[in-house]
Image: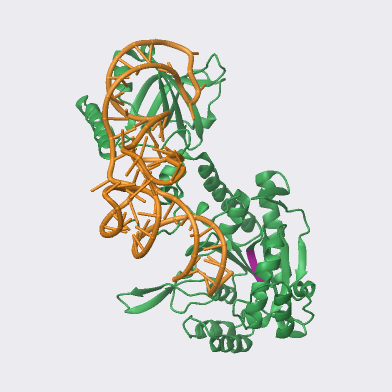
Chain colours: A green, B orange
RNA sequence: GGGCCGUUAGCUCAACAGGCAGAGCAGGGCACUCUUAAUGCCAAGGCUGGAGGUUCGAUUCCUCCACGGCCUACCA
């Protein structure tokens, strides 16, 4: 059946309603949540929702109706409704949104059902819903027309309601711990706080280019200078990089900063926060992720970054020859990389990351790849920093914040020396802020989308973002 | 950016090896007052993602394009 023909038939029904003097797009309707109903409820109840199936039996029919809270069967009977209402019911379609009033009863097969005494068409469908049994499978349509995915696939509804739950739990946890939520600029004049290519936009009135933020870090730390001691922000950052199952151009990060703390305090907080969420949601320490079984039991594993390499025969990670030998011993392609940190990063990604299934902290990183972190005591070439891996994914990154403005300026200068596609600009305004003294602090970033992926069992970041970026069709 | 795979009715899928493009669901008609993937009967529904090419003949083989998926790269 062509789409045009289907639409034509539906519009004819729409016209039928109008011909009866009934507005097919209704107004406010007082109703209860479907999930709040049970067999003990006596008397009349009102619900509203979308009709998902209709099983017509001549002078009676059963329908399934869903609202956000759940699903219920409703029973239309001609001798209960009368001629007029039953005639109207014949012009109700799968997908219509209606309000229903009636009494609850239990069918012979034991199912809670609403015996409909009156109903109101609240919104007429003109499109055609996907198939009731197989649902909507086409991933492209699921992403482009997320509303159809949400109507048809309960698992999708569950994923996004879990995302909300997780975010609420994070906010409650942090609020209870004395953190305050703040909002810092998403449009930056100088992109900073991470190593990534930014999106560029333009302000007409000021006639200046602006960058969508790649991280909120430098602004949040300005607030520490200003005397705000525990701050966090949960919101979007934007990175103009490739798209993959782990990367969407806009993604949600939690960043938080705790004055007078350090990376160890952040580690404790991370453990407690995620452990709390897992237990609240699953009532267990263990969950499945793909074919992995993840055990969140405390304490989590801690491995020094420097110790990662020893099992590959690399005794001194600064020795490029040893690293290259490890690559050839492992029959691993160096992919033309010559930089020590790039080689180690590649080795980590190939051989170590996939094994980090249970939550694992990797601790103490080289200063070269941590320009905003404070040095390890007595070891100026290393910093107080950790990364957290769960289910083979990098989930969090934290460090003791560098608060020495002179050292920070030096690091920035070294950073722009290195080849990069980032604008070669130093955020002098941030350096100036540090000159007014920032308290020592611990800082933490958690990739919210990836955390939600692990906790909802979704293999792609697009499954946990309501509207992932896609090229326009045609 | 590179590699591989996919795109057939509104949806979910068929069409062996190049030979008239098929089913279920949804939609339409008829019957049916406890069904739940309701059932039975009838009728309809397609430029096979787009453009070229090979061939007597292309959903099928080839080229290009579009969109998507997975892997990979940049990155996080």
Q: Is residue A201 left or right of residue A243?
A: left
For the residue pair A246 and A208, the one nearer the viewer reads as A246
Could you tell me if residue A17 is visible in this image?
yes
- Say above or below: B38 vs A284: above
The residue located at (76%, 84%) in the rendering is: A379
**The magenta segment:** A395-400
For the residue pair A81 and A184, the one nearer the viewer reads as A81
Q: List x then y, in percent, for residue A346.
A: 64, 73
- Say above or below: A175 vs A70: below
The residue located at (70%, 43%) in the rendering is: A283
Q: Is residue A294 left or right of residue A11?
A: right
The picture quadrant where one finds residue A79 is: top left
The quadrant in which the C terminus of chain A is found is bottom left
For the residue pair A177 and B15, the one nearer the viewer reads as B15
The quadrant in which the N terminus of chain A is found is top left
Q: List x then y, in percent, for residue B34.
A: 48, 13
The picture quadrant where one finds residue A369 is: bottom right
The residue located at (25%, 35%) in the rendering is: A5
Q: Is residue A141 left or right of residue A300?
A: left
Q: Is residue A153 magenta?
A: no
Q: List x then y, in percent, for residue B18.
A: 38, 45
The residue located at (29%, 18%) in the rendering is: A87
């Amino acid at each position: 059946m062509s789409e045009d023909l289907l639409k034509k038939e539906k519009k004819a029904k729409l016209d039928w309603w109008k011909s009866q003097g009934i507005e097919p797009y209704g107004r406010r309707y007082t109703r209860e949540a479907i999930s709040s109903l049970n067999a003990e409820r006596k008397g009349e109840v009102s619900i509203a929702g979308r009709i998902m199936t209709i099983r017509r039996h001549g002078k009676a029919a059963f329908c399934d109706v869903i609202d956000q809270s759940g699903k219920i069967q409703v029973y239309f009977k001609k001798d209960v409704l009368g001629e007029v209402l039953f005639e109207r019911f014949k012009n109700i379609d799968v997908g219509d949104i209606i309000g229903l009033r009636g009494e609850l009863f239990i069918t012979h097969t034991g199912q809670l059902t609403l015996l409909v005494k009156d109903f109101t068409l609240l919104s007429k469908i003109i499109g055609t819903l996907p198939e009731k049994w197989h649902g909507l499978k086409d991933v492209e349509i699921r992403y482009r027309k997320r509303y159809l995915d949400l109507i048809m696939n309960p698992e999708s509804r569950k994923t996004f309601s879990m995302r909300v739950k997780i975010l609420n739990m994070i906010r409650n946890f942090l609020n209870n711990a004395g953190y305050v939520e703040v909002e810092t600029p998403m449009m930056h004049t100088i992109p900073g706080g991470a190593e990534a290519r930014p999106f560029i936009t333009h302000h007409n009135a000021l006639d200046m280019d602006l960058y969508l933020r790649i991280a909120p870090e430098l602004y949040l730390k300005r607030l520490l200078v200003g005397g705000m001691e525990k701050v966090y922000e949960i919101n979007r950052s934007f990175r103009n990089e490739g798209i993959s199952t782990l990367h969407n151009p806009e993604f949600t990060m939690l960043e938080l900063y705790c004055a007078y703390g350090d990376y160890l305090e952040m580690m404790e907080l991370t453990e407690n926060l995620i452990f709390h969420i897992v237990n609240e949601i699953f009532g267990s320490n263990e969950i499945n992720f793909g074919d992995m079984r993840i055990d969140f039991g405390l304490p989590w594993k801690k491995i020094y970054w420097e110790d990662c390499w020893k099992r590959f025969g690399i005794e001194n990670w600064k020795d490029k020859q040893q690293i290259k030998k490890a690559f050839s011993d492992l029959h691993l392609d160096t992919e033309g990389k010559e930089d020590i940190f790039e080689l180690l990063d590649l080795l980590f990604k190939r051989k170590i990351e996939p094994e980090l299934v249970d939550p694992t902290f990797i601790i103490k990183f080289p200063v070269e790849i941590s320009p905003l972190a404070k040095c390890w005591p007595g070891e100026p070439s290393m910093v107080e920093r950790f990364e957290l891996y769960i289910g083979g994914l990098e989930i969090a990154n934290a460090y003791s914040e560098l608060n020495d403005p002179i050292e920070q300026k030096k690091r920035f200068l070294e950073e722009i020396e290195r080849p990069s596609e980032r604008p070669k600009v130093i955020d002098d305004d941030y350096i100036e802020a540090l000159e007014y003294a920032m308290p020592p602090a611990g800082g933490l970033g958690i990739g919210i989308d990836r955390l939600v992926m692990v906790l909802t069992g979704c293999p792609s970041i697009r499954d946990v973002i309501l509207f992932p970026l896609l090229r326009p069709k045609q």
